[in-house]
Image (spheres, coloured by chain):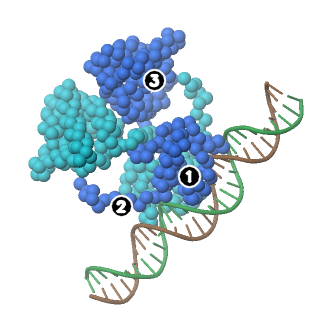
Chain colours: A cyan, B blue, C green, D brown
DNA sequence: ATTGGCACAATGGTCCAACCAATTGAGCAG
DNA sequence: CTGCTCAATTGGTTGGACCATTGTGCCAAT
């Protein structure tokens, strides 16, 4: 173990200084996601650094998804920024095959079950009413379109994560979810994807409403299991197609 | 839901082209993590782009942790790179307070348990021998120094994650671990931090070696529970100190 | 009044040439 | 062999120029 006393010696590079200043600026101006940042030229002049340095700093934020740049238009905030953020770039080698998608589901399995437990333990009456509202919306959308709808489904799960009282669940699972859905839409030939998971949303909610953590974990695991089955069916479909 | 048919219209920017070319170069040269890449000037000339563009591309890889740049020395590969890598950069509001540390443990609880299950299901005999080696090293370090050692402890857990066959476990938990250890060293007045978790390392290994997923989950949960207890004790310590 | 096209300014993207700062290694004095 | 100096190498920064895209306002045609 390295002695922490003499380890850091932070030679704060120019970029970091720019980003720190930018964090303060965003805070003082009260900028929210979607708002436009000052132009690179303005930032460069204001911070007394070259535009190249500003660009390197913004490139880093862009790669982290904190900011979006549109040529001819400007640079826009994409997410809330604070000082002391911890950046965790996850990299999955070759992310568009069956195995990689399965890996995201294994993560979700662990986290969704845990979130369901915490949610069942901590939910207030208001929280439960809120979650039920999302559930009803999802069920209506299901019956109206005769199929799962990603949007409302996600809203329901999101309500659970938020009620868990731990913001990390939402952020990590959101990343898994995004990666998964980037591919699940059409490529896999399964038309009624997610159909089988429908009933478990209601049973999961019932356990949460009854403050039953053990039951909530079990229902969450069943729900993920149906998605895994769908994925396996999709993979089998693909294999069959490629053979013909 | 947006119709995916008419969404992308990918105008491949210059940076991406550079990075793709670099992936091919790394592949053709068989470069491994730790190896040195060509200098920025050489890359610029070879790819017929300006050095600025090369730098922007490398800055992006650096932010993703794929590459490390040392002024005066060169640019070094830090991780395997392949085409079709999928990047999921997460940024977490890094709290330095008790609640945030507890949040990281809740994530670890879900993931370590799941990793232990998968490890017990999938471990080959060689894997188990490797894990046991790490365990023995940790136990020796424990007896030699009469206390937990972060380094060897982490190596043991790392071996389990790697055996789980899912690289995401290692990456996510590593981030949680870093966030946690950024504060656990001395600030909390608990001297024998992690001491109570020691015996569960052996029991966890026994379950894995016996290919007992259910038992492995249980032992992993017990292990995390002891860490949570330590953290709670540390928080109580802090409160007591601040009152005097 | 609405629509379509056009010129123009603003903004991010690229390029170049130079210089700064840290690292490395060769050469040399002790 | 040790320790120092020095020069070449390499990433970091700068200023200035130009390109490509976007947004806006004006104007003519409908």
Seen in the image, is A238 located left or right of residue A40?
left
Does residue A109 appear in the picture of this structure? yes
Horizontal and vertical percent position of residue A14:
58, 48
Q: Which element is circle 2 on? A: loop
Contact, mark 1 vs mark 3 (Cβ under 8 Å): no
Q: Secondary structure at mark 3?
A: helix
Q: Residue at x 22, y 29 (%)?
A: A217
> Which disc number belongs to residue A108?
none
Is B64 positioned to the left or the right of A233 in the image?
Answer: right
Query: Callout 3: 10 Å neighbours few (<14), some, many (20+)?
Result: some
SS at mark 1 in the image: helix
Label 1 in the same subunit as label 3: yes
Q: Position of residue B70 (x, y in %)?
A: 61, 42
Between discs 2 and 3, the one toward the N terminus: 2
Per the model, the C-alpha gap separating discs 1 and 3 is 34 Å
Residue B20 picture location, percent across and down: 47, 51
Residue at left offset 25%, top offset 42%: A239
Mark 3 lies on residue:
B154
Tags 1 and 2 on a common chain: yes
State left or right for residue B14 relative to residue A156: right
Mark toward the start of the polypeptide (1 vs 2): 2
Examine the image and state in which quarter residue A219 appears: top left
Residue under numbered circle 1: B55
* B107 shown above or below A178: above
Chain letter for the residue marked with disc 1 in the picture: B
Location of mark 2 (residue): B9
Tell me if residue A129 can be seen. Answer: no
- Cα gap from disc 1 to disc 2, whole angstroms: 26 Å
- Looking at the image, is B125 positioned above or below residue B41? above
């Amino acid at each position: 173990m390295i002695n922490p006393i003499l380890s850091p010696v932070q030679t704060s590079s120019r970029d970091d200084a720019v980003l720190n200043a930018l964090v303060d600026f965003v805070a003082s101006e009260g900028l929210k996601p979607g708002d436009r940042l000052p132009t690179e030229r303005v930032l460069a002049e204001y911070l007394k650094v070259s535009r190249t340095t500003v660009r390197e700093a913004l490139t880093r934020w862009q790669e982290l998804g904190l900011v979006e740049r549109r040529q001819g238009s400007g640079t826009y905030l994409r997410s809330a920024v604070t000082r002391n953020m911890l950046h965790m770039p996850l990299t999955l080698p070759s992310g568009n095959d069956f195995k990689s998608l399965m890996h995201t589901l294994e993560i979700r399995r662990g986290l969704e079950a845990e979130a369901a437990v915490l949610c069942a333990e901590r939910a207030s009456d208001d929280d439960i009413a809120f979650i039920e509202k999302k559930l009803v919306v999802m069920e209506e959308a299901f019956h109206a379109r005769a199929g799962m709808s990603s949007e409302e489904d996600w809203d329901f799960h999101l309500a659970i994560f938020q009620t868990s009282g731990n913001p990390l669940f939402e952020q990590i699972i959101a990343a898994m979810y995004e990666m998964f859905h980037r591919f699940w839409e059409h490529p896999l030939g399964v038309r009624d994807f997610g159909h089988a998971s429908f009933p478990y949303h209601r049973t999961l909610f019932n356990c949460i409403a009854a403050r039953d953590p053990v039951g909530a974990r079990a229902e969450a695991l069943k729900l993920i299991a149906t998605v895994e089955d769908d994925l396996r069916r999709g993979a089998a479909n693909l294999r069959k197609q490629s053979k013909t």
